[in-house]
């Protein structure tokens, strides 16, 4: 596969769309927007303002409104969303107009939420600029903002009209940001695609770049995992034959979201996901479901890419309280996606506090 080759991954369902993966694929933005559009609202991470002109130049026949929003989770607030709504009203933004997001996962979540709620839904196209955004936030139609009590507690399902994963943006990322995205890639491997894990185990983490065919295959495989899951269960109503359905994509996220919230979002999402995946692996082992070898494989793979597999300084009680308001909870009962083996996920409902604490203690005592 050459660097100029493009891959189109079709996401079916009631509102089908394509995810285009390759280099310089943002040139397809105008065609993806289509005809009959007068205005485009571009929601962009403030750090990416230098890239706006290169995107907006393709939309010279349209009126482009640029909304630079705070970086990271600080963008995902009701106040930021409301300020965009007010501006859209002032500009006469109609149902035939389009929102475009340019940024990482948080910008994608926010822009998608604005599109889902303005006039009860306008089209949105995502141009993710981080690995995390490409394999997670941009695909699947989940949008959301945070509240004082938790992450993504306010949101809507709103599938994009298209996604342009321009791999060239990956070369703008710090090693830490690239590693953060790898956490979601590895998650997809553990829950659905063992080949992702094999590729990751043979890859040189220091060599990952936009030009690396291994990284590209990892991106495409992770997107396909998510696409397959959301087509089968868009609104997270449940899978078949014991499969968790869309909940499977939340593997590791119950603890991860709690860690993010307790830290004041000072930890990267992927770093929190790595901790969360190791935690549920330990929990599954204590529940008699997962082998010790597969728990060790979690630790080995996440640490291989520079991600944390141990933490300190956060009391279990603090995290436990936040986990109780996790979206997957049912009443007072916590629910976790766990594994019986690689690519064999299921839901563990109401684990004992003894097992919850023991798995947490394992995070404290790791040698990593």
Image (spheres, rainbow, N blue to C red):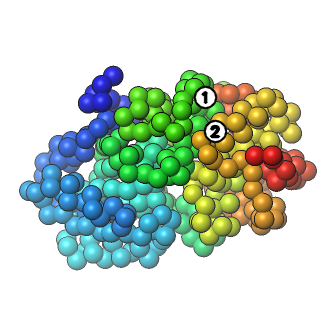
Query: Seen in the image, is 368 located left or right of residue 77?
Result: right
Q: Identify whether 5 is placed above or below 269.
A: above
Q: Residue at x 41, y 32 (%)?
A: 212
x then y, percent, for residue 64? 18, 63
Query: Seen in the image, is 68 located left or right of residue 241?
Result: left
x then y, percent, for residue 34? 17, 46
Circle 1: is it few (<14), some (14-19), or many (20+) Cα within 10 Å? some
Residue sitting nearer the eye, 281 or 97: 281
Q: Residue at x 29, y 64 (%)?
A: 49
Q: Earlier in the sequence, mark 2 or mark 1?
A: 1
Q: Identify whether 190 is placed above or below 280.
A: above
x then y, percent, for residue 358? 88, 49
Pointer 2 and pointer 1: residues touching (CB < 8 Å)? yes
Q: Secondary structure at mark 2?
A: helix
Q: Residue at x 22, y 67 (%)?
A: 65
Q: Secondary structure at mark 1?
A: helix
- Residue under pointer 2: 304
The circle drawn on residue 201 is 1
Residue placed furthest toward the left: 61
x then y, percent, for residue 292? 82, 31
Give residue 249's quadrant in the image: top right
Q: CA distance from mark 2 to mark 1?
A: 8 Å
Residue sitting nearer the eye, 36 or 321: 321
Query: Seen in the image, is 31 located left or right of residue 144?
Result: left
Residue sitting nearer the eye, 306 or 42: 306
């Amino acid at each position: 596969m050459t660097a100029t080759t493009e891959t189109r991954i079709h996401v079916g369902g009631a509102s089908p769309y394509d995810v285009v993966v390759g280099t310089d694929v943002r040139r397809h933005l105008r065609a993806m927007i289509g005809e009959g559009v007068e205005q485009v609202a571009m929601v962009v991470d403030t750090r990416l303002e230098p890239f706006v002109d290169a995107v907006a130049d393709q939309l010279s026949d349209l009126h482009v409104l640029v909304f630079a929003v705070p970086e990271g989770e600080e963008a995902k607030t009701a106040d930021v969303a409301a300020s965009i709504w007010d501006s859209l009203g002032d500009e006469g933004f109609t149902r035939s107009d389009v929102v475009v997001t340019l940024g990482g996962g948080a910008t994608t979540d926010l822009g998608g939420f604005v599109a889902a709620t303005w006039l009860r839904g306008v089209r949105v196209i995502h141009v993710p600029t981080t690995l995390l955004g490409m394999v997670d936030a941009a695909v699947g139609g989940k949008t959301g903002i945070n509240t004082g009590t938790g992450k993504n507690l306010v949101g809507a399902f709103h599938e994009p009209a298209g996604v342009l994963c321009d791999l060239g943006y990956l070369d703008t990322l710090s090693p830490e940001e690239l590693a953060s995205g790898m956490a979601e890639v590895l998650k997809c491997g553990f829950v659905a695609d063992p080949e992702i894990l094999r590729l990751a185990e043979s890859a040189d983490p220091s060599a990952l770049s936009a030009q690396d065919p291994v990284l590209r295959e990892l991106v495409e495989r992770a997107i396909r995992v998510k696409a397959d899951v959301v087509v089968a269960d868009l609104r997270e109503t449940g899978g078949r034959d014991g499969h968790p359905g869309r909940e499977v994509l939340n593997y590791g996220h119950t603890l991860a979201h709690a860690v993010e919230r307790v830290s004041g979002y000072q930890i990267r999402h992927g770093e929190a996901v790595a901790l969360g995946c190791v935690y549920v692996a330990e929990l599954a082992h204590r529940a008699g479901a997962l082998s010790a070898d597969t728990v060790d494989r979690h630790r080995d793979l996440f640490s291989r890419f520079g991600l944390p597999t141990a933490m300190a300084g956060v009391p279990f009680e603090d995290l436990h309280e936040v986990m109780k308001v996790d979206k997957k909870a049912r009443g007072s009962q916590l629910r976790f996606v766990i594994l019986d083996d690689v690519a064999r996920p299921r839901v563990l409902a109401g684990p004992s506090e003894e097992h919850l604490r023991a798995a947490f203690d394992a995070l404290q005592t790791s040698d990593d």
